[in-house]
Image (cartoon, coloured by chain):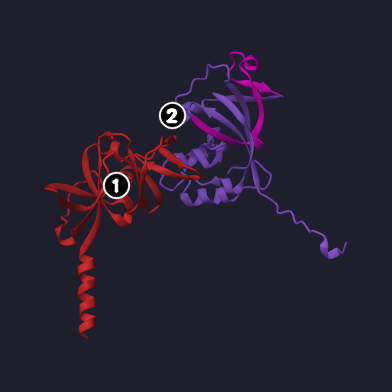
Amino acid sequence: MLRATCGQQQAQVTKRLWNMLVFSVGGMKLAARTEDVGGISSWIQSIPVPSRTPFVQAMLKRDNQVMPVYDLATRLNRKPQGEPLLCLTAHHLDGPMAICIDAEVPTLETVDAAAIRQTGRGDIETLGSVTIGGNDVAIVALQRLGQLTQDADRL
Amino acid sequence: MSLRGRNHTTSIPVETAGFLIVCLGASYIALPADGVRGVLTKDDTGDKQTVTAAGTIYQPVDLAQRLFLTADLSGPDMRTVLYSCGHSHGAIRVTQVVGLADVERKDCFPLPPQFQCDERNWFAGMLLYQDQLVLVLNPSWALGGAAAAAAPVSVAQSEQICLAIPAGVGGAC
């Protein structure tokens, strides 16, 4: 009985903590849940693709793997900073997607779910925001990135 | 030598599709080869945009403009591809003809579902050719099929098209 209770408490503690990857785009700090991130690698030249989908207008080819690029920097009216730029592979609901991020190496943070605030920002899909290093950092919902702009286009 | 020692070879049919690979500006585009009726140089066409060949009139198709691409069509490698799709015939000017390719089905992919707008009508899929990413043009749309342009192709439809590569035929990827 006691063991079961301890296990449940442990599960609750684990559940309350979110593992986050903190990265930056054009100097803006952003976070994402680690389970939504497929990996970080060096950025390679993307291949432009004629497209009308907002911010999805290129593809990245690494060996025989091809994935669409989401231009998060342009969406945030920013330009990726530093050299060499990095590539964040997002676990999007529709499949892996590449995002160009700043050269600054991302860091890992663990945050308490209770510290996550809901945000009303409508410019980007988020899971809320959290204070990291004294800054308000938006948690990007990588799985549904692009949904807001496409919904807006359909209206 | 006993019969047992003989090697029995079985040939596994490989499904392929034929494509004419062209450059339009910086983009590589594949045209299903079964619709290609000819490739003309600038000397062949002169200043004419509309081309008549073997009794068929090929109306000019400004593919670069339709795909919102910047392409220099004044270079020495510029070619006009005469293309037919059903009852539609078009003269498509391209920056360069790269070559003809038989592409195996496994090297042909649907457009990723993150591409959700008009481009799903423009392209039937994509393929890798000589390490290049090549977009497979939808000829019905390119030649001005109003019906094809009206309703965007869904992700599921696109995947079905990609899976339906006819063996040895240059159908849509």
Q: Is residue B53 left or right of residue A132?
A: right
Instruction: Identify whether A112 is placed above or below A122.
Output: below
> Between residues B106 and A65, which one lies in front from this camera angle?
A65
Residue under circle 1?
A: A148
The quarter of the rendered structure image containing the C terminus of chain B is: top right
Element at badge 1?
helix
Residue A124: image location, x then y, percent: 25, 45
Residue B20: image location, x then y, percent: 62, 33
Q: Is residue A7 left or right of residue B88?
A: left
Element at badge 2?
loop
User: What colour denotes chain A?
Assistant: red
Q: Is residue B129 left or right of residue B26?
A: right
Callout 1 crowding tier (Cα within 10 Å): few <14, some 14–19, many ≥20:
some
User: What colour denotes chain B?
Assistant: purple
The quarter of the rendered structure image containing the N terminus of chain B is: bottom right
Callout 2 crowding tier (Cα within 10 Å): few <14, some 14–19, many ≥20:
few
Instruction: Identify whether B142 is placed above or below B107.
Output: above
- State the residue at coordinates (54%, 17%): B75
Which span of residues is magenta-colored? B27-53
Dots 1 and 2: beta carbons under 8 Å?
Answer: no
Q: Amino acid at mark 1?
A: Leu
> Between residues A62 and B58, which one lies in front from this camera angle?
A62
Q: CA distance from mark 1 to mark 2?
A: 24 Å
> Between residues B138 and A100, which one lies in front from this camera angle?
A100
Chain letter of mark 1 equals A
Q: Quadrant of residue B143?
A: top right
Instruction: Identify whether B61 is placed above or below A99.
Output: above
Q: Residue furthest bottom?
A: A1
- In magenta stretch: residue B52: yes
> Between residues B143 and A45, which one lies in front from this camera angle?
A45
